Amino acid sequence: MKRSLFKHEFKLTFFSKKNILFTSFLLVLLFSYVFMILPNEFNIESFQKEEVEHKLQDISSTQEWRLEMGYTGIYPMTGAYFASQQSYLEQHEKMVTAFENENYNRYLHIRTNYLLNGGYRDYRESDLFYQEPLPGKDKYHLYHKNILRFHSYLNDDEPITYPMIQERTALQKLHQFLTSSMIYLIIFAAIYFSSDVLIRDRTHQTLLQGFPTQWYSLLNVKSLAAFAYTLLIVTGVVGLGLILLSLTYGPGYLDMQIPYKKDYRLFYFEAYDYMGMKEFLLKSLALIPIVVYLFIRFNVLVSLLIRNTWAVLFIGTALLFSERLYFDRSTRELFGIDLSYFPQTYFDIGQVVTLEKNYLINTDTITFSQGLIVLLITLVVVELLLWITTRFINQRSFFQS
């Protein structure tokens, strides 16, 4: 009986017009990003050959003039400017040659050596993180992570490609997706798909009359159907994205190492460590279903109390973005309680797994294990509240009110 009910609920969810429209929106967003946005997306490690060559021509002309005038020494205000510019010129000419020959292993060797010997100025003088409260700190953080990332590529046996350097391969983009605010799109999908899973029956009450199932069990089946549908759509869209990115930029590899800052109190490279891509994905995939199911059950609870689809959608979305109301780089407590005890802290799943959230607010309390415990406890609390609510709002009172 429950299997038949599950199939019925899944079919209703699958063929829902609003769900089809939202899934179509996700697909349009995916194709737009892969084929329109990403090809024109550049970061600080993108090698724009024409711009580099133009800059090298200017430096070369200036160097020739300084050589003719004898301005090649060390001066109080500029130091060994001629020597540093000559080194910059020689290294980047080698990079251009390696890039033209598609010898990315050699290119990365030269680039890494340059970054370790004065190349931080590329980061320091850039407009990266200009809207962040601590742009200098964030530039330094990215600088260390990129150098460590390059070292891991050079030490691996896998062939180095330009998309790997730019972080455009499928697995790298998946990592970026999970560590960015785009992870909220997965959670919002769960909220959206389950916002009417109970309320829609108020206009089609006869659909459930053939299923003599207890009220709480009925809600469980509805939740599982919404959960299965959400995972199916998310897996399908993400899987399609990985295929498209793999065909365009390469898949990457599961042994790829992800640098992360393990101790916010330390500086330089000793503050960092590596996490394997497999470990990152496994931990992320452990948290995502919990968060998704948590919001689905929360939506069912709110649906019992409010019985309006738009209100359920609004309340669920407000909870999802609730951390944005108080979060900043100096906030480590809320109402005198450490942020690690609040479930909304762990909605940024990728940042929790890589300890990036600890880096952002200078703490060491927000961890994967703590998040797992807090989210599971929250799920138990929501489940208990839902069970209690069904004692007071039974099936008849819900449909007749």
Image (cartoon, rainbow, N blue to C red):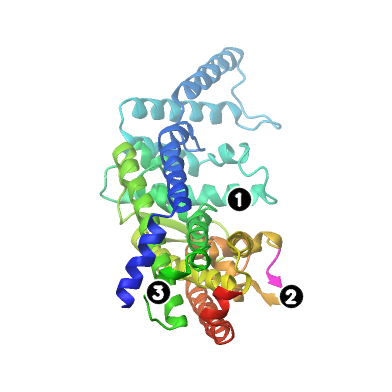
Q: Say which residue appears at 51% left-offset and 63% top-offset.
A: 196
Q: Amino acid at mark 3?
A: Val
How crowded pointer 2 is (Cα within 10 Å; few <14, some 14-19, many 20+) is rated as few
Whether tag 2 and tag 3 are in contact, CB under 8 A, the answer is no
The label on residue 221 is 3
Mark sitting earlier along the chain (2/3)? 3
How crowded pointer 1 is (Cα within 10 Å; few <14, some 14-19, many 20+) is rated as some
**SS state under label 2:** loop
**SS state under label 1:** helix
Q: Mark 3 or mark 1: which is in front?
A: 3
Find out whether residue 330 is within the magenta segment. yes
Q: Amino acid at mark 2?
A: Phe
Residue 31 x/y as whole percent = 41, 38
Mark sitting earlier along the chain (3/1)? 1
Start and end of the magenta stretch? 329-335
Q: Say which residue appears at 39% left-offset and 67% top-offset.
A: 225
Near-viewer residue (273 or 235): 235
Q: Is residue 23 visible?
A: yes
The label on residue 335 is 2
Whether tag 3 and tag 1 are in contact, CB under 8 A, the answer is no
Residue 296 x/y as whole percent = 49, 68
What residue is shown with label 1?
Answer: 138
Q: Judge whether 25 appears above or below 85 on screen.
A: below
Determine the CA span between mark 1 and mark 2: 28 Å
Q: Quadrant of the C terminus?
A: bottom right
Residue 219 x/y as whole percent = 46, 76
Q: Quadrant of the N terminus?
A: bottom left
